[in-house]
Image (spheres, rainbow, N blue to C red):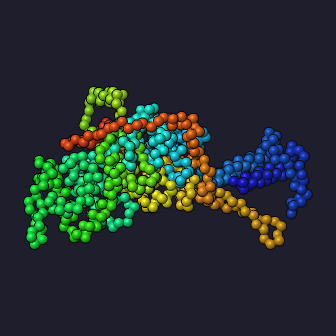
């Protein structure tokens, strides 16, 4: 831009000095500022004040006026042309390599983070930033970097809907459960499978919708989550074989003992007579020569046509039990031994007397989280974290599975009266009861990668927001996340909100520097050749990262990065809840005590798929994405 200004200045000087010379230096111009006696063949050059050029127009004669107008046109044409060139080149070069920057005040306002309640992200200029939108959140913070004081505890104080929190040390329970129970009036529970005191219990097998077309799917989810954590390097064949035999055992036990637990499963698998038990169930007898002979099945799991309705086969022996027990028995004894070793190893935690006691019955069901505002703390002592990991994985998997039923849309034409009465009815129900569509559920999963690969969570982040589920995943670094889910995982892409604290590894700063982007910088350099006194100057346009990996690694402890999809990064500050008046008094409530409660499982229980009420009025919507967008726009959680 500077060179175009100089160009215009030179043209201006030339015009304002050339014109008086052309008209013979009239007296009206006054005395010259300076006179040059000779330049080449040109003599007696007088230099006047350029401003005089604009003062003499009233005293011009006709023959000189045309010349005056010509020079005016030159000036008027040159000025905008130079300005246009200057601005055009400036804009063209300004962002040639990027225009990365941090979010400004207007952009932060558009993010709609200044809410009274919600998931706490951090602070910006003293104002707390909270998310109540449908975006999932991932937080990356290495050990002792303040994710607890900034995000976890503060969120448990401010999130007013249901929550499942992975509370590894029990700190969240001790500091926040009392407030959630007494002030937020929530149904608050703690599941600690290693507890020796009377406490809340959970039997995962109670979640099986027995004698329905969902039973095999339910059993498969439970068994696969327990046996395949993605962390062990066992041959997939043995894992799959173990899954099949355990599925058969679970179904067999549930049909003969409705309140069967996973302790019963490991006990059955550990029986020395296991192979003989299978033979008896399958109706196999061995003759004197040692040959097996299949007789007519005499074992009956049911006495009616249940399996005809579910599996299309009219028999009394469960067809899945028959299939997988048969496959197992037909394999060589060495193969059976390897399969059994994997199954017993994966379910070995249910031999522990404390875990057995706390998984025999259920004090709660997963669906309670949607039916009423509930806080479920999954407490695990650090020393028992590895042992209890399968149960934690299972509860989160069941949460996604049970709380995201197939959506049904009402396409029936309604009259104006029907629509009006429906809206009135809904308002009355929402006034008296908690609307399931308004009671959202937060999955707060601390140390997410430590739980192993949860494929159902990885897939669910793409669609669970439409069911009112919000994910808040916490890990130490991008390296830790990729070690479990791989570089091509879509987890990061499906996180609409990302929070980063000062990283302590090499990969996270590199990734973060790329995410922050580049800005365009103009670099000026000077040089001198040999003994020349004069220097030569040059400028170059280069790409420069908004922050280098080294700068990110040295980020002050109290600073954090917050990224909302569609906006530049926010450079925010951490919240120290114990010093913040918005939170410091909220931990002064004692945790609730266990009052004793057992959920009874009915033998002939009928299960219905629950649908979110928010979708009931989406008439004619066939595209689920459109329905989810409508739900997003209609939710009001204030």
Q: Along the horizontal axis of the image, is 444 left or right of 206?
A: right
Q: Position of residue 191 (x, y in %)?
A: 38, 45
Q: Please state the total of marks drawn on the protein image.
A: 0
On the image, which quarter does residue 627 sit in? top left
Q: Along the horizontal axis of the image, is 573 left or right of 464?
A: right
On the image, which quarter does residue 269 sit in? bottom left
Q: Residue at x 52, y 48 (%)?
A: 147
Q: Is residue 340 above or below residue 444?
A: below
Q: Position of residue 638 (x, y in %)?
A: 45, 33
Q: Residue at x 56, y 39 (%)?
A: 578
Q: Residue at x 59, y 39 (%)?
A: 579
Q: Is residue 154 above or below residue 385?
A: above
Q: Is residue 92 above or below residue 125?
A: below
On the image, which quarter does residue 404 sit in? top left
* Residue 269 seen in render: yes
Q: Along the horizontal axis of the image, is 82 left or right of 145?
A: right
Compare residues 538 and 348 and report the one nearer the observer. Answer: 348
Q: Position of residue 449 (x, y in %)?
A: 44, 56
């Amino acid at each position: 831009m500077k060179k175009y200004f100089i160009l215009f200045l030179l043209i201006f000087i030339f015009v304002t000095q050339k014109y008086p010379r052309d008209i013979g230096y009239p007296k009206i111009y006054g005395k010259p500022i300076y006179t040059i006696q000779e330049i080449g063949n040109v003599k007696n050059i007088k230099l006047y004040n350029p401003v005089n050029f604009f003062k003499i127009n009233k005293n011009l004669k006709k023959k000189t006026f045309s010349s005056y107008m010509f020079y005016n046109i030159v000036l008027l044409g040159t000025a905008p042309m130079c300005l246009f060139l200057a601005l055009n080149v400036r804009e063209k070069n300004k962002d040639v390599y990027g225009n990365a920057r941090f979010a400004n005040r207007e952009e932060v306002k558009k993010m709609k983070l200044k809410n009274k309640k919600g998931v706490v992200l951090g602070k910006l200029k003293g104002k707390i930033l909270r998310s109540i939108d449908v975006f999932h959140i991932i937080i990356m913070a290495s050990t002792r970097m303040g994710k607890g004081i900034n995000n976890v505890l503060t969120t448990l104080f401010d999130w007013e809907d249901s929550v499942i929190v992975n509370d590894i040390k029990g700190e969240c329970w001790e500091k926040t459960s009392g407030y959630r129970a007494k002030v937020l009036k929530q149904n608050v529970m703690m599941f600690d499978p290693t507890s020796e005191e009377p406490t809340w219990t959970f039997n995962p097998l109670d979640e099986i919708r027995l004698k329905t077309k969902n039973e095999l799917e339910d059993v498969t989810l439970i068994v696969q989550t327990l046996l395949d954590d993605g962390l062990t390097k066992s041959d997939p064949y043995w894992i799959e074989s173990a899954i099949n035999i355990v599925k058969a055992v679970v179904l067999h036990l549930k049909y003969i003992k409705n309140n069967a637990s996973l302790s019963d499963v490991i006990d059955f698998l550990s029986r020395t007579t296991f192979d003989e038990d299978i033979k008896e169930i399958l109706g196999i007898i061995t003759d004197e020569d040692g040959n097996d002979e299949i007789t007519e099945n005499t074992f009956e799991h049911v006495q009616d046509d249940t399996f005809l309705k579910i599996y299309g086969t009219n028999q009394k022996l469960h067809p899945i039990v028959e299939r997988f027990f048969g496959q197992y028995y037909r394999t060589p004894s060495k193969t059976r031994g390897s399969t059994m070793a994997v199954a017993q190893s994966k379910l070995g935690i249910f031999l522990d007397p404390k875990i057995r006691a706390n998984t025999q019955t259920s004090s709660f069901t997963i669906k309670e989280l949607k039916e009423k505002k509930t806080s479920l703390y999954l407490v695990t002592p650090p020393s028992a974290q590895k042992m209890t990991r399968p149960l934690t994985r299972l509860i989160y998997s069941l949460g996604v599975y049970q709380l995201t039923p197939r959506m049904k849309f009402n396409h029936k034409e309604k009259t104006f009266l029907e629509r009006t009465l429906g809206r009135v009815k809904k308002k009355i129900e929402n006034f008296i009861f908690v609307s399931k569509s308004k009671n959202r559920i937060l999955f707060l999963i601390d140390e997410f990668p430590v739980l192993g690969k949860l494929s159902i969570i990885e897939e669910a982040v793409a669609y669970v927001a439409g069911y009112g589920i919000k994910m808040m995943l916490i890990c130490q670094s991008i390296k830790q996340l990729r070690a479990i889910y791989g570089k091509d995982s879509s987890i990061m892409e499906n996180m609409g909100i990302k929070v980063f604290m000062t990283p302590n590894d090499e990969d996270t700063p590199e990734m973060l520097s790329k995410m922050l982007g580049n800005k365009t910088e103009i670099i000026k350099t000077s040089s001198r050749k040999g003994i020349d006194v004069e220097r030569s100057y040059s400028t170059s346009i280069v790409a420069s990262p908004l922050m280098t990996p080294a700068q990110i690694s040295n980020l002050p402890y109290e600073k954090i990065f917050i990224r909302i999809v569609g906006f530049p990064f926010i450079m925010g500050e951490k919240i120290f809840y114990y010093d913040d008046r918005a939170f410091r008094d909220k931990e002064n409530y004692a945790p609730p005590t266990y009052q004793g409660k057992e959920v009874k499982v009915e033998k002939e229980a009928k299960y219905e798929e629950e649908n979110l009420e928010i979708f009931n009025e989406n008439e004619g919507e066939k595209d689920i994405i459109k329905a989810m967008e409508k739900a997003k726009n209609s939710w009001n959680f204030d």
